Image (tube, grey):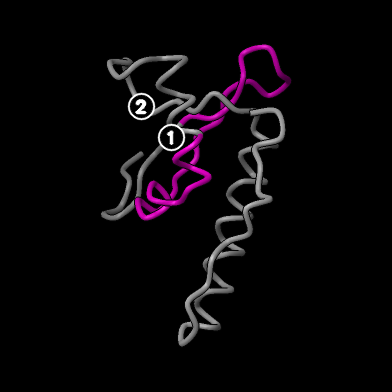
Amino acid sequence: MKVKKGWLAIQVGLEEEDGGIQRFVIPISYLHHPLLQKLLDKAYEVYGYHGDGPLKLPCSVDDFLHIRWQIQKGANHQHHHKNHHQHLPSTLSFHSC
């Protein structure tokens, strides 16, 4: 399946969990978010830089969905308050990622 410009296909999931690995398409801008940066660092630790195929994130699907929700929530909050400089709370975490 072709991914439109400005978006990135990723694989998320753990082999041992129900549902296995799932494919998601996210905006490339998410790669700059601190939560996804931490997950990319973890992916490097697990898979290295030279993995075959699409970008794989070592995180459960449920945890990734939570992270994606936090990123979207922060983006919506910043969009509504664009005249004020906003920071995401430092309490965001990866749960079991």
Q: Is residue 80 above or below residue 50?
A: below
Point out residue 68 in the picture as x, y percentages from the top left corner. Answer: 58, 49
Q: CA distance from mark 1 to mark 2?
A: 6 Å
Percent coordinates x, y for residue 85 in the rendering: 47, 77
Q: What amino acid is labelled 1 in the image?
A: Ile
Callout 1 touching callout 2 (CB < 8 Å): yes
Q: Secondary structure at mark 2?
A: loop
Residue 37, compared with residue 28, is above or below; it is above
Which tag, 1 or 2, sits closer to the chain's start? Answer: 1
Residues rendered magenta in the picture: 11-38
> Label 1: which residue?
10
Q: Is residue 97 above or below residue 77?
A: above
The quadrant of the picture occupied by the C terminus is: top right
Where is residue 58? Give x, y as percent: 54, 23
Inspect the magenta stretch and tell me whether residue 62 lies in it: no
* Direction from residue 70 to residue 37 in the image, left or right: left
Q: Looking at the figure, which quarter contains the N terminus?
A: top left
Observer-nearest residue: 7 or 32? Answer: 32
Q: Position of residue 45 (x, y in %)?
A: 44, 17
Please name the residue shown 49% across and 36% down the image.
38
Q: Secondary structure at mark 1?
A: strand
Q: Callout 2, which amino acid?
A: Pro
* Disc marking residue 54: 2
Camera-nearest residue between 93 and 24: 93
